[in-house]
Amino acid sequence: MKKQLIQAGLKAIFPLCVGAFPFSFIVGAISINAGMSVLQSTLWSLTVFAGSAQMVALGLVQSSTEIIVIFVTTFVINLRHILYSASLSEYVKEYNMPTRMLMSYGLTDEVYAATIGEMKHEKPGRQWFYLAAMFGFWVNWVVADFCGAMIGSSFPHIADYGLDFAMVAAFIAIVIPQVKKRECIVAAVIATVTGILLSGLPYSLGLVIAAIAGVYAGYRMDISTERMEAETKAEAKKVILQELADEQQYQQALSSTTTINK
């Protein structure tokens, strides 16, 4: 079972690994152009493990921005991971603290998208599915960064080639099939529209606001659905009780009629 779950996790994350490789490759190449060594670039990717934050931070470093600004900016960009953590918390509370800390370290956009469906199912050992997907993506990310640091710097304008779109395409292919329920559809639409309207905000704030808006919209829709289901159940219960009462009255009337006839 453990081996099967590990294989399934690696299989689930593989399409996103293919898409993420060019993006991490670009990050590695740009980091060298920003003044890092190959070792520094690789260790940075290994410990940070956040593509968008790394890309923005590199731009700020090249602009000689103060460290506090870089820290705050990357912190804001990664706020969306709080939403991922909140979503997964219900399904990982049974695990011990070291396991949850390890899972939180690898909770990227791609890992969340590839594993949330499996984590919702209360199957024994499902943490191996998650950990396999997480480590598979992490190794792919670090190796791609190393390759980019080694040879990508030979292409000074590699970021303009559009290679990073492969990750976006793969991410869309993974996420869209999961958007089936009304709550998910509403959340996706609201987040998409908000993200487009606020795309001009600095430091990717539009993305953070869009994520929060989408989650809130989905939450409100979920509450509305639960309320409607509760009202429907209450109405059905009322009808059933009324039918039982009518049946009881009918039986009493029938019994009275029989007694009179006797």
Image (cartoon, grey):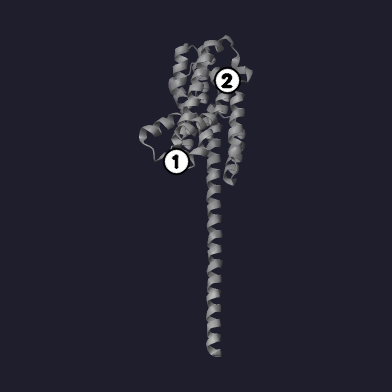
| Depth order, front residue of 167/73 | 167
**Tag 1: residue type?**
Tyr
Q: Work out whether mark 1 precedes mark 2 in sequence or the reverse, and give the earlier one.
A: 2
Above or below residue 30? Residue 18 is below
Callout 2: SS: helix
| Contact, mark 1 vs mark 2 (Cβ under 8 Å) | no
Above or below residue 31? Residue 48 is below
On the image, the x and y values in percent for residue 114 come to 53, 33
Whether residue 194 is visible, yes or no, is no
Which residue is rendered at x = 56% and y = 12% of the image? 152
On the image, the x and y values in percent for residue 224 come to 55, 51
Residue 39 in which image quadrant:
top left
Mark 1 neighbour class, 10 Å CA radius: few under 14, some 14 to 19, many 20 or more: some
Q: Residue furthest top?
A: 154
Above or below residue 230? Residue 250 is below
Which residue is rendered at x = 63% and y = 17% of the image? 161
Q: Residue furthest right?
A: 161
| Depth order, front residue of 29/55 | 29
Disc on res. 91: 1
**Tag 2: residue type?**
Pro
Which residue is rendered at x = 58% and y = 28% of the image? 15
The mark lying in front, picked from 1 and 2, is 1
Q: Quadrant of the C terminus?
A: bottom right
Q: CA distance from mark 1 to mark 2?
A: 32 Å
Which residue is rendered at x = 43% and y = 32% of the image? 104
Above or below residue 93? Residue 8 is above
Mark 2 neighbour class, 10 Å CA radius: few under 14, some 14 to 19, many 20 or more: many
On the image, the x and y values in percent for residue 85 come to 45, 36
Residue hosting label 2: 22
